[in-house]
Image (tube, helix red, strand yellow):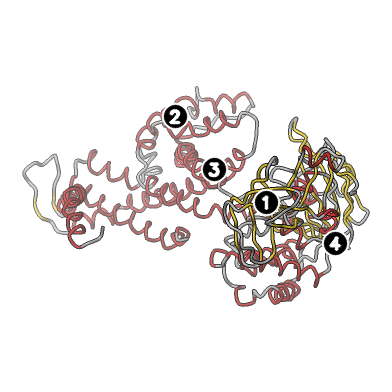
């Protein structure tokens, strides 16, 4: 069981409010991703849940029990660190066994659990090696193995994939998602990469400056962002924001349209623009354009589009995909 | 840049300094070896003659030799234990974010900059003196008899002084090693349920093993030749209680004017130092491979 509930959790370092007060509900078995730009407090929030930092105020409830003043070990959580934090002088076996050893498990039990974890993570052949003799992906697996043997109430991941190369990252992403499906344990995952957030999460928590901007399913955040920050952060390439006359036409301060929600024409449309750079990826084409009276925008077209530099084009946004914002950046209902 | 001609040029260019360093080492060693086979006493000039290994026989069968060998090993061993354990504990303390840490670190390092003779004089006259020393004053004001350190426990007194001198070195090396310990590792151990004691033995101490090796090796080299502290305080006595090999060689050479015997003693000391070094490197040198 691993239902986690944060009630008005605050953290200050000196005079700086890093987390001014967060309320959050995480259901048992959920995969929750904390996402936000660097310095938004997402790692601090994770460390508060882990117990590696003390909360300044507020409650952290795990299965209904307030653990805010308990040491990390008493909370029954395990964590995978960005640097993996493997013990360099211990073999893979001892790395994975360390938590069980500290819990005073018998040798036979430890052996069985370590062997099981090694089997799940394809580490059986490496148990006698030291972390120094492993590749990045294998170290990552050892770190996960160390976390799963303790059978925790929840897993905490602190940007676990940021030290891996792009290809490996995609692999590990699938492996972690698969692991979650097998174990059905609560997972809290911190990342600054919105692609990881979109692909892995059951629920995304978008943070900025220690504040929760929006909580929801990935596609909810994509289709109905609560404000301009979430709209700009979720989705790649970024949403385009248009002010002035275009916004007035929709009775708001600013409108936002995702790059993939335009119809492109070489003859006529709402917005006239010139292509600056066309990135042809085969399956899709990114057009970096200069729109008349608006400035630089990004448009994404599916498939191969026969456009290149200096071509004149016209864009028409899909009317039900236009996001409207007021002057404070809060989203208004769609028209 | 590793063509044959550039390699050759490199060798030619570095040859003078290598030859110079080699002569620097081999000439004194060769002369000492040569003297050790002579009957060579400064009180009998012009009477030098080849006597084979007689000097070695005298030196090695001298009861003073075994006493001083034991003293040397006891001194080196005790100081190593005190400085390594003390160094780890002080290092751990100075690694904490405590008030006045900068000044505290400076104070801890200070003894290392004091020359051994001054160190010995301070301890002898200001601290351990049975009448006017501070330890005597403390003992007296608590109602105890003061201890005459240099006659009651002379080797212990020397060990205390030398440890005081070398503790900062150990702290310096071990503190830098502690600072390079990844914070994530400690936190991971915390998450794994390890308490402060377990973290120390399972995470911190293994991390320090290489630094401890360095401390032990370097200190051993210098501690085998401790001289000034003994010369200034006890003069090797009472009896042979504080005579180590280095001091024994000195008494041979300069108190008995026996250059031949002292040279033999010196060579024996060199061989002993090498035995200790081989032993140490075998024992703990594998820590230096990564």
Is the same chain shared between marks 4 and 1? Answer: yes
Please tell me which of labels 4 and 1 falls first in the chain: 4
Chain ID at mark 4: A
Q: Which residue is mark 2?
A: B124
Q: Where is residue B173 shown, x and y percent of the image?
A: 49, 44
Q: Report if residue B202 is visible in the image.
A: no
Q: Nearer the viewer, residue A227 or A37?
A: A227
**Which residue is label 3 attached to?**
B175
Q: Which of the 4 image quadrants contains residue A128? A: bottom right
Q: Residue lying farthest left?
A: B46
Is B120 on the left or on the right of A267, as rendered? left
Residue A53 location (% of width, % of height): 76, 44
- Find the distance from the CA under tag 4 to the CA under tag 1: 34 Å
The quadrant in which residue A320 appears is: bottom right
Disc 1: which chain? A
Q: Check contact, mark 1 vs mark 2: CB within 8 A.
A: no
Marks 3 & 1, CB-CB < 8 Å contact: no
Front disc: 3 or 1: 1
Cα gap from disc 4 to disc 2, whole angstroms: 72 Å
Quarter of the view holding residue A56: top right
Disc 4 designates what residue?
Answer: A30
Q: Are marks 2 and 3 in contact (CB under 8 Å)?
A: no
Mark 3 vs mark 1: same chain? no
Secondary structure under the numbered disc 4 in the rendered image: loop
Residue A291 picture location, percent across and down: 67, 45
Residue A116 visible in the displayed image: yes
Query: Of helix, strand and loop, which one carries label 2?
Result: helix
Few, some or many residues within 10 Å of mark 4 (<14, 14–19, 20+): many
Pointer 3 chain: B
Q: Tally the numbered discs.
A: 4
At horizontal 65% and vertical 45% (from top left) the residue drawn is: A296
């Amino acid at each position: 069981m691993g239902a986690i509930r944060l009630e008005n959790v605050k953290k200050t370092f000196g005079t700086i409010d890093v987390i001014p007060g967060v309320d959050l509900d995480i259901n048992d078995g959920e995969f929750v991703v904390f996402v936000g730009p660097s310095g938004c407090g997402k790692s601090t929030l994770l460390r508060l849940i882990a117990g590696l930092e003390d909360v300044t105020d507020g409650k952290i409830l795990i299965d209904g029990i307030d653990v805010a003043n308990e040491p990390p070990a008493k909370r029954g959580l395990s964590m995978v660190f960005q640097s993996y934090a493997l013990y360099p002088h211990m073999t893979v076996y001892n790395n994975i066994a360390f938590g069980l050893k500290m819990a005073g498990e018998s040798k036979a039990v430890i052996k069985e659990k370590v062997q099981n974890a090694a089997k799940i993570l394809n580490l059986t052949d490496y148990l006698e090696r030291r972390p120094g003799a492993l590749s990045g992906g294998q170290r990552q697996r050892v770190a996960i193995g160390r976390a799963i043997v303790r059978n925790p109430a929840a897993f905490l991941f602190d940007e676990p994939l940021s030290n891996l190369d792009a290809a490996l990252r995609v692999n590990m992403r699938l492996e972690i998602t698969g692991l979650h499906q097998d174990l059905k344990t609560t997972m809290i995952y911190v990342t600054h990469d919105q692609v990881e957030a979109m692909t892995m999460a059951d629920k995304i928590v978008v943070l900025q400056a220690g504040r929760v901007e929006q909580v929801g399913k990935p596609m909810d955040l994509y289709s109905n962002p609560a404000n301009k920050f979430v709209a700009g952060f979720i989705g790649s390439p970024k949403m385009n924001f248009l002010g002035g006359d275009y916004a007035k036409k929709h009775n708001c301060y600013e409108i936002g349209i995702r790059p993939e929600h335009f119809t492109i024409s070489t003859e006529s449309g709402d917005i006239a623009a010139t292509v600056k750079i066309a990135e042809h990826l085969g399956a899709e084409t990114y057009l970096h354009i200069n729109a008349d009276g608006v400035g630089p925008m990004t448009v994404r077209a599916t498939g191969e589009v026969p456009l290149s530099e200096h071509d004149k084009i016209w864009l028409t946004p899909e009317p039900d995909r236009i996001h409207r914002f007021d002057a404070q950046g809060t989203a208004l209902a769609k028209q | 840049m590793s063509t044959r001609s550039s390699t050759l040029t490199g060798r030619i260019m570095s040859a003078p300094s290598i030859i110079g360093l080699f002569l620097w080492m081999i000439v004194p060693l060769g002369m000492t070896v040569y003297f050790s086979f002579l009957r060579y006493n400064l009180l009998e000039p012009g009477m030098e003659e080849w006597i084979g290994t007689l000097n070695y026989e005298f030196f090695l069968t001298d009861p003073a030799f075994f006493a001083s060998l034991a003293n040397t090993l006891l001194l080196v061993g005790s100081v190593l234990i005190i400085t390594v354990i003390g160094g780890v504990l002080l290092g751990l303390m100075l690694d904490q974010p405590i008030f006045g840490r900068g000044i505290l670190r400076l104070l801890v390092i200070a003894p290392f900059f004091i020359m051994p003779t001054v160190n010995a004089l301070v301890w002898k006259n200001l601290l351990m003196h049975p009448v006017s020393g501070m330890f005597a004053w403390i003992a007296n004001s608590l109602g105890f008899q003061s201890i005459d350190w240099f006659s009651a426990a002379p080797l212990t007194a020397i060990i205390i002084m030398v440890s005081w001198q070398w503790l900062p070195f150990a702290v310096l090396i071990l503190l830098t090693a502690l600072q390079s310990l990844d914070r994530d590792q400690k936190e991971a151990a915390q998450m794994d349920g390890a308490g402060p004691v377990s973290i120390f033995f399972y995470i911190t101490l293994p991390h320090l093993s290489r630094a401890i090796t360095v401390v032990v090796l370097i200190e051993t080299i210098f501690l085998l030749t401790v001289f000034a502290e003994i010369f200034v305080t006890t003069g090797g006595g009472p009896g042979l209680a504080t005579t180590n090999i280095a001091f024994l060689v000195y008494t041979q050479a300069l108190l008995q004017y026996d250059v031949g015997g002292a040279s033999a003693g010196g060579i024996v000391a060199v061989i002993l130092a090498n035995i200790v070094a081989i032993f140490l490197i075998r024992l703990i040198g594998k820590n230096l491979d990564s």
